[in-house]
Amino acid sequence: MNKLPGVNYLYMAESLPSDENTMMNFVDSLASFFAQSWTRGRPDNMTSQEHGDLAATCRARLDSLSKSLPGHLIPVVAQVRENMDGLFSGSYPIVLTHGDLSEMNMLVDPDSGALTGVVDWAEASLLPFGFSLYALDSVLGDMYLTGWTCHENADQARRRFWDTFCSIAQPSHAERQQMEVARLVGILFRYGTPVSSGFPGMLGIRGEDDGSLAFLEAFI
């Protein structure tokens, strides 16, 4: 971390969201980070067989979730599974995806709030774009004993993120719909899968007490 500028986001987690300018600077730079991934993604980097294998791995992970998540979440898994084929069509970008894009692995400028670096790529893998968009959701509020509470400027920050992202990446309407499917898949994998599940790529965090299910329900 000392080879990159900035401080860990966790040190700014309390002060950054309360300052509108620094929060908007952060989401602008986070949007730019994702837009760079989108514009540099190349669907033709993978063969049709590799696309098929990746799709099968993701379906297997969703099938596993269907057997382990609380019943009221199963319809979400089924809906995502039904709509995810477009992510492996060969035209949707497959990109280098951070396996643990949490606040702990994002560095920010303490003065401006802008994202300055992303560290800990040990679990990175090639996945359809958007599987790590949970990073945006995770900074738009806080989890308390009473549940998830959004920051006052959460809606504004989300709109700002997508306005900035779309101005750079210029996705079509159909691609934006696919991104939302990918975002939901990523949230399910991240917060619904135990870290020891054995699936490659993006880490899960669900523990024995299933505390992360509160994040899963809040984000979907």
Image: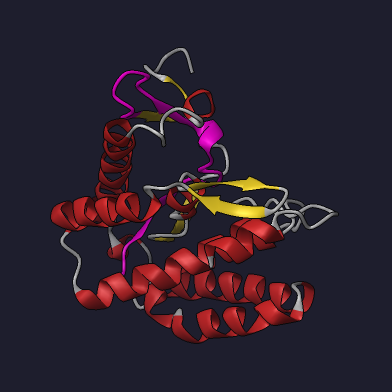
Horizontal and vertical percent position of residue 172: 19, 72
Image vertical order of residue 185 relative to residue 17, above or below: below
Front residue of 220 and 208: 220
Image vertical order of residue 119 relative to residue 88, above or below: above
220 left or right of 164 in image? right
Horizontal and vertical percent position of residue 117: 38, 28
* Span highlighted in magenta in the image: 90-115
4 left or right of 35 in image? right
Q: Residue at x 50, y 31 (%)?
A: 13
Horizontal and vertical percent position of residue 39: 22, 53
Horizontal and vertical percent position of residue 170: 15, 61
184 left or right of 159 in image? right
In reply to whether residue 93 is colored magenta, the answer given is: yes
Image vertical order of residue 163 relative to residue 121, above or below: below
Q: Name, please, the residue furthest toward the top.
A: 2
| Residue 107 in sight in this render | yes
Q: Residue at x 43, y 55 (%)?
A: 133
| Residue 91 in sight in this render | no
Q: Which residue is drawn at 37% across and 16% down?
A: 5
In reply to whether residue 43 is colored magenta, the answer given is: no
Q: Residue at x 32, y 49 (%)?
A: 157
